[in-house]
Amino acid sequence: MDKDITIENVLGDENCSTVLTLSPIAEMNESNITGSSITEEQDEIVSERIQDHSFSAFVVDPLKSISKRTQLFEDVAQTSCCSAESPVTPPEVLRKRLFNLKTQFEHLTFEHEELIEFTQLEKQVHHMDCVPVDQVKVQEDELARMNEKIQILMSENSSLRKMLELNKSETAQLEAKMITTQQCKNAAKEAIKTISFKIKEYLQASRRNEAKQRQSFPFK
């Protein structure tokens, strides 16, 4: 296969172009690459073009081009020889891998949530450790006031207990007095009954005596 490389003057010359003909590649082996170089006349023309018009950016080195193409062919050939169909993974293995990945994902999610909670707690502790001095003074004052209130409540509680004990003793005394009063009331009832009975007997006796006297001294 013959390859031609055409170098044109892009600086304004209409009929100025040079065609470099590359010889065909005979063989491409791992150790030997053959190819003919350009002619001396063409080489001189290219050199003149480069010196006159600074045409170096558009000149292609034939030897480098052959080397790059040969390397590309070798890579393609090696890839084609080494390519093989990948083995098909059984569905059971894929399911097992999927299950393992899902388990690992859940575990990592749980650890992530715990890490977030730990970070929040750590921030709270750090915030509590970094309380300003003024706020600490205010908290100490509030604590002192609360202690005073607690002392007052405890003293009031002791006073109430004493009053409760006194009330209990007074209640016992009142209960004893009520019992005594009830006993006196019962005794008074019995005395009233006895007196009433005696009065009735006295009245009956006096009536009998009057009747006897009337019988002894009848009226005219």
Image: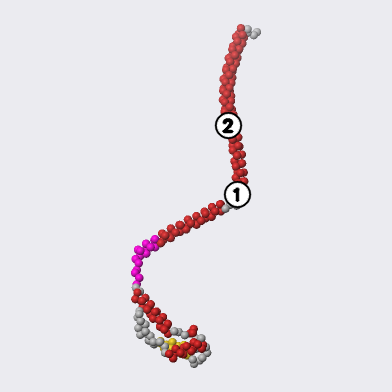
Amino acid type of the residue that numbered disc 2 sits on in the rendered structure: Glu
Residue 162 in which image quadrant:
top right
Determine the residue positioned at 61% across, 44% down: 144
Q: Earlier in the sequence, mark 1 or mark 2?
A: 1
Q: Secondary structure at mark 1?
A: helix
Q: Which residue is mark 1?
A: 136
**Taking the image as drawn, is residue 178 in sight?**
no
Determine the residue positioned at 59% across, 17% down: 195
Closest to the camera, between mark 1 and mark 2, is 1
**Where does the image place residue 126, in percent across and percent down from the top left?**
54, 53
Q: Quadrant of the N terminus?
A: bottom left
**Image coloring type:** secondary structure
Q: Which residues are magenta?
A: 85-100
Give the spatial CA distance, label 1 vs label 2. Answer: 43 Å
Q: Which residue is mark 2?
A: 165
Prevailing secondary structure of the magenta residues: helix
Crowding at dot 2, Cα within 10 Å, few <14 / some 14-19 / many 20+, comes out as: few
